[in-house]
Structure formats: structure tokens, C-alpha cells
Image (tube, rainbow, N blue to C red):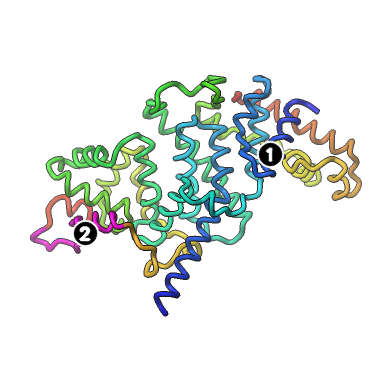
Amino acid sequence: MRKARAAGAQAAGRQALAALVLGHVGNVRRRMALRLPSYAVEDAAHDALARAIGSAFDGTSVGQFRSWLSTITNRTIADFYRYRERHPDPDPLGGGCEGEDERGSRFEPAVGSEDGAVEMQVVIDEVMGELNEDHRRVIELHVFGALPAKDVCSQMDGMSPDNVAQIASRFRTRLREELGQGGSL
Amino acid sequence: MSDVERLLSEYIAEHRAGGEADPLAYLARADPRERSELATLLDGYLVRAERAPFDEHAFRGSPAERTVDELQRSLAGRSGLWPAVLPGLRSRIGLKRSELVARLADGLGVGDRQEKVAAYYHAMEQGTLDPAGISNRVLEVLGQIVGETADSLRKLGSSPGNPELGPAPEVMFARTAQQIADEQLSPVTSGPPTEEEQDEVDLLFRGG
């Protein structure tokens, strides 16, 4: 009986862990792919997930975990470039990884530095921080949520499709300005 | 609609439909002058995106399964996150375990006792060695090899894990036959050596 209960708890624990890892690993890999050379993506994604799940997170909510995982993902990317700066042996498979548009059929990002790697999220946070609450909501729904302008309006009093388009346009203009000042991919 | 807006919109549609949604494929289609903006928007979307539903078939044999295995070992073991993180750090610098052990033994000045250092390091990766007993000297040398600070390694080793997500140690999953065989051969799992039996390597890994 005790053995059966133990086996059940073991299976349930593993299932919960598997759902958490598999639920997030794809997006972590994709985010890593935007900033790291391809050879480093899989290990870095594993490392970020292991650290995020196994460390200080206390499991209070899905939203908090997503935010925590995002922080750890950014930190893991920064660690990769910091390590590479100290140990310049960039690609164990041979070949470079920066500044190339194509390697065979595979596009590679050309971030190439710790600053460049963490910049994306910082820029978004900064530009979002300049907006009032309503405008931030428009960006979340329309730009990052891909909700059509008319559907955004149906969720927000006093907002017209033209307003939505203008807010989104101004957001992207500010984003470009910030990216222009801070380097490029 | 600008090219960036169109590509972002197509990307979100593919992602939500459960497609591969490779961001690099979309960046490759963008005007080089607009890639920075598109990459930033794609990243912003991915931070906010819903997690994928669990798919047993996709999980079996995937790299995610390795992550789960190592996390389970971490959550149930005595060495915090070392089982989940140390192999990855070793992989990042492109070293086999035997090569890392050789460097570690040399760095500790016990190059003539590599076999014993190997057993202790193996126990660290398996989560069977108490981190409190490991000296700072070991963590400093190991940190220099893998590119982490001794403090960071210490914290990873003492991380309590999340009990909600892992089974209690007494119901931990059965380890593979190979691991058990390895541990049976290992001097570090057969109990601490007596004071007379202890040598410099034991003190480095068990003496605190």
C-alpha cells in the first residue's frame, strides 16, 4: 500500500514537472535563438529552466513563474556572453556566429555581446514604462496579443480604432528610436 | 501594415496554431534594417505567450525529458541544483567528465588521485554528496574551470528546490542501473572514511 502511494506520488510529481518544462521550453528556446548562436541554444534553455524551476521560485502563481523564468532566461543569456568574453572559444562546432545573415539556410542572430542580448527586454520595458495604463493595455492587446483594433475597442471604453492604430504606431516609433540609440541585432 | 507588423502578426498566428514558429525564419525574411525591431517585438511576444499544452508523445525522448530527469534528481537529492546544472556547465566548455576531473584534480594539487576526485565529482553531479562538506577550495577550482564563481556554485548546491514540483526523497524515482552501479563502485557512497582512512581528497570534499 505504502509502495503504491509512493509510486503514485512519484508519478504525479514527475507529470507536474514534465508539464511545466514542456510548457515553457519551446518559448525559452525561441527567445534564446533570438540572442544566442544556435550551438548554445539547447544547453542554455535547459540551464535556464533548471535554475528557474529548481531555485527560489515558490510556485505561487503561473504569472509569477513566467516572470521569474524570463528573468532567469535573460540572466542565462548574459552569463553566456560574459563567459565567452573571458574564454573566447566561440563555436565548438567550428565557424563564427556573429554578423552572418545566412549560414547555409540557417539565419543566425548577431547579438554577440551581453549588452546586446539583454537589450530587447530592457527597451520594451522602458518604452512601455513611458505609457499610461490605458496605452499599455492597448499595446499588450493589439501589438503583443495580435487583437484587431476593433476588438481592442470593444474591451476599452472611449477607445477608437484610430486611437489604437496611433498608440501602436507611436510605440513602434519609440521602440525604433531606442534601438537606434542602443545598437542593433 | 508595415512589413514588421505583418511578420509579427504571421508569427503570432503560427505560434498560436502550434507550429514550429522559428523566430529566426521570420527575421531572415525581414529587411535587415528592421530586424532589430522585429526581434524585439518577437521577444516581447514570447515573454507573454501562453505555455504549450502537455504532449506526452512530444515529451518522450525529447531534450525536455533530460531536463525533467535532472530536475527530479536535484529536487530529491542532497546537492541542490548541481545534478541539473553541473553537466550543462561542463557541456558549455566542451569538456568530458574525465577531462574536467583531470583539471580539477590538478588544480587541487592531487593529480595523482584522479580516480578518487572522479568519484566525488560524480557524486556532486548525481546529487549524492552533501555540499556543506565541500571546501571552498574545491568550488574555487571547479568555478575557474566551468566559468562560475565559488559563491554561485555554493548557492546552486544549497538551493532547496521546490517541494511542490518534485517527489519527496523517500519516493524518489529509481535511478538507472548504471548510476547505481557507479555509486556502488564509488568510495563516497559507502559512508565517510574513518579519521585514519581520510586523506587530503576526503578532507577537500567532506571536511567543509
Please name whichever residue, B17 or B146, is drawn nearer the observer in this view of the structure.
Answer: B17
Give the side of residue A155 with respect to residue B113, left or right.
right
For label 1, the SS is helix
**Can you tell which quarter of the image residue A166 is in?**
top right
Q: Gap between marks 1 and 2, in whole Å?
A: 50 Å
Q: Which mark is residue B14?
A: 1
Count all numbered tags in the image, as a single digit. 2
Check residue B189 for magenta coloring.
yes
**Can you tell which quarter of the image residue A185 is in?**
top right
- Callouts 1 and 2 in the same chain: yes
Q: Residue furthest left?
A: B196
Please name whichever residue, A171 or A1, is drawn nearer the observer in this view of the structure.
Answer: A1
Magenta residues (range): B177-197
Q: Residues within 10 Å of mark 2 (few under 14, many from 20)?
A: few
Residue A48 position within the rendered picture, expressed as x and y whole percent measured from the top left: 49, 45
Residue drawn at (24%, 42%) of the image:
B101
Residue B46 position within the rendered picture, expressed as x and y whole percent measured from the top left: 63, 41
Please name whichever residue, B170 or B78, is drawn nearer the observer in this view of the structure.
Answer: B170
Q: Which chain letter goes with mark 2?
A: B
Please name whichever residue, A15 or A139, is drawn nearer the observer in this view of the structure.
Answer: A15
- Amino acid type of the residue that numbered disc 2 sits on in the rendered structure: Gln
Q: Which mark is residue B184?
A: 2
**Relative vertical location of residue B64 with respect to residue B22 in this rendering, above or below:** below
Residue A69 position within the rendered picture, expressed as x and y whole percent measured from the top left: 55, 48
Q: Counting residues from the N terminus, which is met first, the one under dot 1 or under dot 2? A: 1
